[in-house]
Amino acid sequence: MRRPFSLAVAPNGARKTHADHARLPIAPDELAQCARDCVEAGAAMIHLHVRKADATHSLEVADYEPAIAAVRQAVGQNLVLQLTTEAVGICQPAQQIAMVQALRPEAASVAVRELVPDDAALPAAEAFFQWMHREHVVAQYILYDANDVRRYAALRGSGAIPEGRHWVLFVLGRYSAGQKSSPTDLLPFLAAWHDMGLDQSGVEWAVCAFGKQEADCAAAAVMLGGHARIGFENNMTLPDGTTAPDNAGLLRAVRTPLNSLGYAAMTADDLRARFA
């Protein structure tokens, strides 16, 4: 078998609603059913967004708690549960940090450019990154372009981002026309990764992508040594151009052909072992 890969599901995002797709999970019970389906489809991790009562984006502890409880009841430890800290243009770093510290999740994603927008924000961000490392909250640092890769490398070099127990996510096509990603969007990230010597660092990387080439981008990432995040947050279209029936359908569209090429999907415990 080839190097195993992990699939994460990003089932909803911050903005989409049932008007976009009837099977887009928003309420805790919907997220729980999605989690069950996605474990069966090969997911090792769920990237969790929650909403307020009006279905708008939330980073409130009170909105996260019932969703976390519902997913855990549904799948136990069969998914790594990663909380988003995405600002969506409305949240500030202090609120993003406070939510993670209050909930102490197994994992959280943090965008470097949101938490460290300038040098003035660095002390608070560094303290938070160090806290996550100490408390065994696995951080996934979100990088939107090659400049973010270089910024991440600088933060690691200075010690602001501690060594080990974290990984990164390359967001492909975030600034492309119509936010439509292509596998070639991965190349500038990997070039910067290599140029900064990060390919020798042992840090795991994953990708997420927008639009109908999501599965192609995921497959390219896996075959180049990475992992993938799939789901309705960024795409609702199967490789054949039809609308996916649900998030699990998108996962199967990635996992099945990779399995046929000899790549094995990791379980949640396999993924946890990478960050022990």
Image (tube, rainbow, N blue to C red):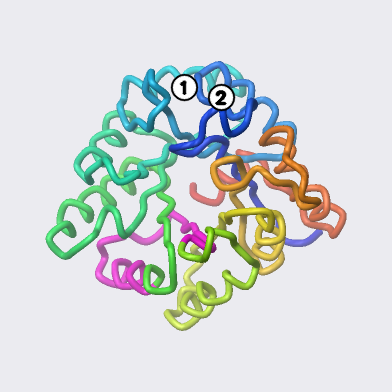
Is 167 placed above or below 82 here?
Answer: below
Quarter of the view holding residue 74: top right
171 in the magenta segment: yes
Q: Position of residue 121 (x, y in %)?
A: 16, 57
Label 2 Cα crowd, 10 Å radius (few <14 / some 14-19 / many 20+) = many
Is 182 placed above or below 34 here?
Answer: below
* Left or right: residue 247 compared with residue 83: right
Residue found at x 38% / y 18%:
53
Q: Please tell me how many numbered marks the rendered image carries.
A: 2
Of residues 15 and 73, the one drawn nearer to the viewer in this rendering:
15
- Amino acid carrying label 1: it is Ala
* Residue furthest out toward the left: 120
Circles 1 and 2, Cβ within 8 Å, touching? The answer is: yes
The residue carrying mark 2 is 31
**Distance of label 1 from label 2 (alpha carbons):** 7 Å
Query: Of callouts 1 and 2, which one flags the residue occurring earlier in the amino acid sequence?
Result: 2
Of residues 148 and 245, the one drawn nearer to the viewer in this rendering:
245
Is 21 placed above or below 270 here?
Answer: above
Quarter of the view holding residue 105: top left
Residue found at x 56% / y 26%:
18
The residue carrying mark 1 is 67
Label 1 Cα crowd, 10 Å radius (few <14 / some 14-19 / many 20+) = many
In the picture, the disc for residue 145 is none
Residue found at x 43% / y 63%:
144
* Left or right: residue 183 compared with residue 239: left
Q: Which residues are magenta?
A: 150-174
